[in-house]
Amino acid sequence: VTSSSGPRPPDWATDLDLPDAGLVARIIRLNLFVTRALDGIAGSAGIQTADHIVLGVLRRCPGRRSTPTRLCEVLGRSTGGMTLTLDRLEAAGWLTRSPDPVDRRRVVVSLTERGLEITTRVNDALHAWEDGLGLDEERRSAMTEMADHLLELFEERSAAHPSDALGRAS
Amino acid sequence: VTSSSGPRPPDWATDLDLPDAGLVARIIRLNLFVTRALDGIAGSAGIQTADHIVLGVLRRCPGRRSTPTRLCEVLGRSTGGMTLTLDRLEAAGWLTRSPDPVDRRRVVVSLTERGLEITTRVNDALHAWEDGLGLDEERRSAMTEMADHLLELFEERSAAHPSDALGRAS
DNA sequence: CATATCTCAGGACAACTGATATCC
DNA sequence: CGGATATCAGTTGTCCTGAGATAT
């Protein structure tokens, strides 16, 4: 994490260009920066990034509740792994598990007051960080619209090929 | 990973909306889809996603070579972890390590012919996948321009605050 | 000598796989 | 009974931390 002093690296190690790189490379790179910021912010708030994302998904579900399997589908994780994550979040008091009265195989996962509070706090900090970037409003809304359009395409696509949604198809 | 048959989940577990969600949430979600596709494609080619990304960065470096530390900065990883990754990639014959004649503390990491070949192959497949999404050309170029603009902002930002570039400050 | 770069060994942790219990 | 849901146990694997080696 040093880059201030000492002998500068030779020029050929300095820059990298994304000339022919496609959208995919750019999205990955964007995600890298975003993830760094999120790690810092979530860390300060005392929650892991991956856990915050689960709470964030939950926050945007109708009624602020969902089921483990549904969360797995959205986030591309296994049910076994999700159980562990939910254990952590439940132990922290950020969500509760309760049996679904309608279908008792199911477990309903609900965001608690404190869970809502922390994910909202992290989200607000993230918004502040985003605002501080100096992105003009025009581009911001254009970018949002593009992203939503792309997301729609992705969702259509994974609805069409559910089997390789997770890249596990033969 | 089931969503085709069986009793549908109740409505309240079905949809999630990103109403007030900012760019960050969208980028994370985009990355999720992209990562799924990449996992599938890279997996078929016999390389891990994380490893492919290292090769991809290398491919876009002038001269197709860089140093471990530089890669760590770009990808936000520790040098120790990078050593292990480079061990893997070197063992696979995708890159070579050689001492820097100018500064012999340094190691120069160079993409091999085979390394260039595999990362190019994966990249082409990714392009094909991207083309298959049905994104019209106008939006595609707009999206690209937006992404590049955002990336510039991010880079300025991390140049301004190098200490918390990795979220490890204080 | 203090700093920079890389490597190595040890440890931590999250996530997956497969099997089990419960329920439709 | 077959399919679905969630959990548990065991394992894997990657990454990080901190110490050490070599060079400046």
Image (cartoon, coloured by chain):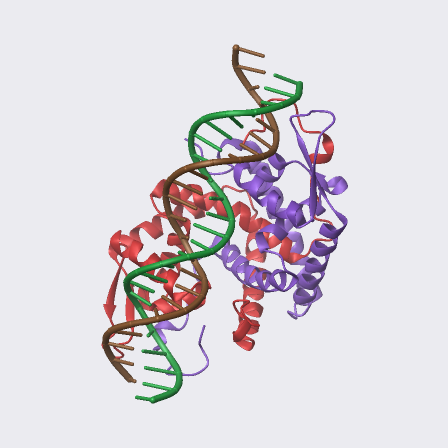
Chain colours: A red, B purple, C brown, D green
Q: Is residue B131 visible?
A: yes
Displayed quadrant of residue D24? top right
Nearer the observer, D15 or B15? D15
Displayed quadrant of residue B73? top right
Residue A119, how many percent across, how many down?
A: 35, 52
Nearer the observer, B81 or A137? B81
Count of numbered labels shown in the rendering = 0
Residue A159, how many percent across, how many down?
A: 52, 75
Residue A46, how many percent across, how many down?
A: 33, 43
Q: Is residue D20 left or right of residue B40?
A: left
**Compared with residue A146, is residue C9 higher up or lower down, i.e. above or below?**
above
Nearer the observer, C3 or A47? C3
Q: Is residue A159 left or right of residue A78?
A: right
Q: Is residue A131 visible?
A: no
**Compared with residue A168, is residue B6 higher up or lower down, i.e. above or below?**
below
Q: Is residue B14 left or right of residue A134?
A: left
On-image quarter of the N terminus of chain B: bottom left
Nearer the observer, A103 or A113? A103
On-image quarter of the C terminus of chain B: top left
**Compared with residue B104, is residue B125 higher up or lower down, i.e. above or below?**
below
Residue B52, how many percent across, how many down?
A: 63, 52
